[in-house]
Image (tube, helix red, strand yellow):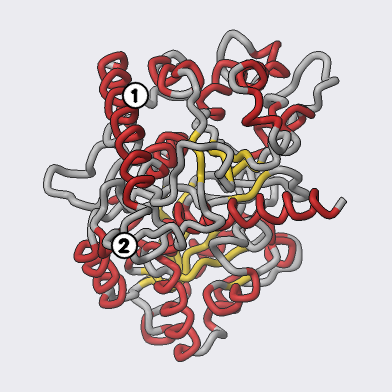
């Protein structure tokens, strides 16, 4: 089954790639097409033609890492996964690991593609680096994780090396669909510890890397939203969802969808669970206005990962969605919450504010989110409930509207979506804008040296 899926994806992506680039370049010279040469000034992207061993061939190994997971079922619809039910038009069982495939398919629709690398403002590498990393993280090559990416670099140096040498990689960018922490193992670690050394390789220092979570002091990477399960195909489906979000009755004050927090050691998830249990027994609708003070959606053991119905319905009914850090600071749940119009509550700056500057403007965080330092909750007894109940209802309504305005920026619309929906910049469009600006700034800095 995996081989059949791979063959179909390879056929469709190669066909779409050749047609899209041809159509883009021919239509840019006509005045009837919405995209003109003037629109594409400083926005031309060249897609590097990589052998399939660097992308689609890797998908044939989708069931070979039992310690990790079998992601074969989620390859459907170019990485969006299967629809949640047969009549669904916008909702899929999306696996975040397949952001590389999703991005690859979407960039084929980008209106400013070129076949000429010499006129390109940026070069996209369709390398599925996170999927390639699985053999080092969970497979037989764990002791050679420093080699992750070296095959790609050797190819870039041997096949049309002028494309790389033109700016020594400063104009190249790619997507890796795991946190940057997984790719920053020091090269001199012996024996190797967790992770690969892709981001530590001097060969790739100049490349811009888009990841769902960056490091505290990122060098190459920029954070982009995790893909949610919401991928509308047209403007009508998108607007119908927005109306549903606006009309939804918020019967719960706060919600936590996740696992953890059941151990004895003090941590923010344990504090949340304890406070929720106490609040639900001591508070009533008469003194809060809510039917339920705190709703916990138990997502232990990954049961929510590919089943958005488990958490999206409760999120639609909650006013605030708690986003405590887990193994790493960021959470896909942040973007699920925004999609549901649920105001995110953060407990670490690294969970979002210092991450997604392209998609969630740093200066606007007070307008759409709440920040409560986790140390105040875990060690100083600050009650989350007191903070949230202290926000006036009028302010809550304004915050929810600000959250709803962010929905287009954090969703990845379906490939092949309608022209009407394409007028709204989504997470992909915003990431492309950010990557182009970053590369432009780097090249300007180089020219001034």
Between 423 and 122, the residue placed more toward the observer is 122
Under circle 1, the secondary element is: helix
In this orientation, which residue lies closer to the viewer: 95 or 377?
Answer: 95
Which residue is under mark 2? 31
Image point 65% across, 69% down: which residue? 372
Whichever of labels 1 and 2 marks the residue nearer the N terminus, that label is 2
Looking at the image, residue 44 lies above or below residue 207: below
- Pinpoint residue 93: horizontal percent, then vertical percent: 31, 41
Callout 1–callout 2 Cβ contact below 8 Å: no
Residue reaching furthest top?
A: 140
Res. 258 mark: none
In the rendered view, tell whether residue 144 sits above or below residue 388.
above
Image x and y of residue 328, in percent = 64, 44
Q: Residues within 10 Å of mark 2 (few under 14, many from 20)?
A: few
Q: Position of residue 341 (x, y in %)?
A: 39, 69
21 with respect to 380 (left or right): left
Answer few, some or many: residues within 10 Å of disc 1's Cα (few below 14, many 20 plus, some between 14 and 19): some
Secondary structure beneath dot 2 equals loop
Q: What residue did someone put label 1 on?
A: 72
Looking at the image, residue 261 lies above or below residue 341: above
Left or right: 160 as drawn, with respect to 1: right
Q: Residue furthest left?
A: 87
For the N terminus, the image quarter is: top left
Camera-side residue of 224 and 47 = 47
Q: Residue at x 69, y 28 (%)?
A: 198
Where, by quadrant of the figure, is residue 247 drawn?
A: bottom left
Please tell me which residue is depicted at 72% across the width and 26% down the height of the picture.
197
For the residues labelled 1 and 2, the Cα–Cα distance comes to 44 Å
The percent position of residue 445, horizontal first and vertical second, equals 79, 54
* Residue 85 against residue 159 in the figure, above or below: below
């Amino acid at each position: 089954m995996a081989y059949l899926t791979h063959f179909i994806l390879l056929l469709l992506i190669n066909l779409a790639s050749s047609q899209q680039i041809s159509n883009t370049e021919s239509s840019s010279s006509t005045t009837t097409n919405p995209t003109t040469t003037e629109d594409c000034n400083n926005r031309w992207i060249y897609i590097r033609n990589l052998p399939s061993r660097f992308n689609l061939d890797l998908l044939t190994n989708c069931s070979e890492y039992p310690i990790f997971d079998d992601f074969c079922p989620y390859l459907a619809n170019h990485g969006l996964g299967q629809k949640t039910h047969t009549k669904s038009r916008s909702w899929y069982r999306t696996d975040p690991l397949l952001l590389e495939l999703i991005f690859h398919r979407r960039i084929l629709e980008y209106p400013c593609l070129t076949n000429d690398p010499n006129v390109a403002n940026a070069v996209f590498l369709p390398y599925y680096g996170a999927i390639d990393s699985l053999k080092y993280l969970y497979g037989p090559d764990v002791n050679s994780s420093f080699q992750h990416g070296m095959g790609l670099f050797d190819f870039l140096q041997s096949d049309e090396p002028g494309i790389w040498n033109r700016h020594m990689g400063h104009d190249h960018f790619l997507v890796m669909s795991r946190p940057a922490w997984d790719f920053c193992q020091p090269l001199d670690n012996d024996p190797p510890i967790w992770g690969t050394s892709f981001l530590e390789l001097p060969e790739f220092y100049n490349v811009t890397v888009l990841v769902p979570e960056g490091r505290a002091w990122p060098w190459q990477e920029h954070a982009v939203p995790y893909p949610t399960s919401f991928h509308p195909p047209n403007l009508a489906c998108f607007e119908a969802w927005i109306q549903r979000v606006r009309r939804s009755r918020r019967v719960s004050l706060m919600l936590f969808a996740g696992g953890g927090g059941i151990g004895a050691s003090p941590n923010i998830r344990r504090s949340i669970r304890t406070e929720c249990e106490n609040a639900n027994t001591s508070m009533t609708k008469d003194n809060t206005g809510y039917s339920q003070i705190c709703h916990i959606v138990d997502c232990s053991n990954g049961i929510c990962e590919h089943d958005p119905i488990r958490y999206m319905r409760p999120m639609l009914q909650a006013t605030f969605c708690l986003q405590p850090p887990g193994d790493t600071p960021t959470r896909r749940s942040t973007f699920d919450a925004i999609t549901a119009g649920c105001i995110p509550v953060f407990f670490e700056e690294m969970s979002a504010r210092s991450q997604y500057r392209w998609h969630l403007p740093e200066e606007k965080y007070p307008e759409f989110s709440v920040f409560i330092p986790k140390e105040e909750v875990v060690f100083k007894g600050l009650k989350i409930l007191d903070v949230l109940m202290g926000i006036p209802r009028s302010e809550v309504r304004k915050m929810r509207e600000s959250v709803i305005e962010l929905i287009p920026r954090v969703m990845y619309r379906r490939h092949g979506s309608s022209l009407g929906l394409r007028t709204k910049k989504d997470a992909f469009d915003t990431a492309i804008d950010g990557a182009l600006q970053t590369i432009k700034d780097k090249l300007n800095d180089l020219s001034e040296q």
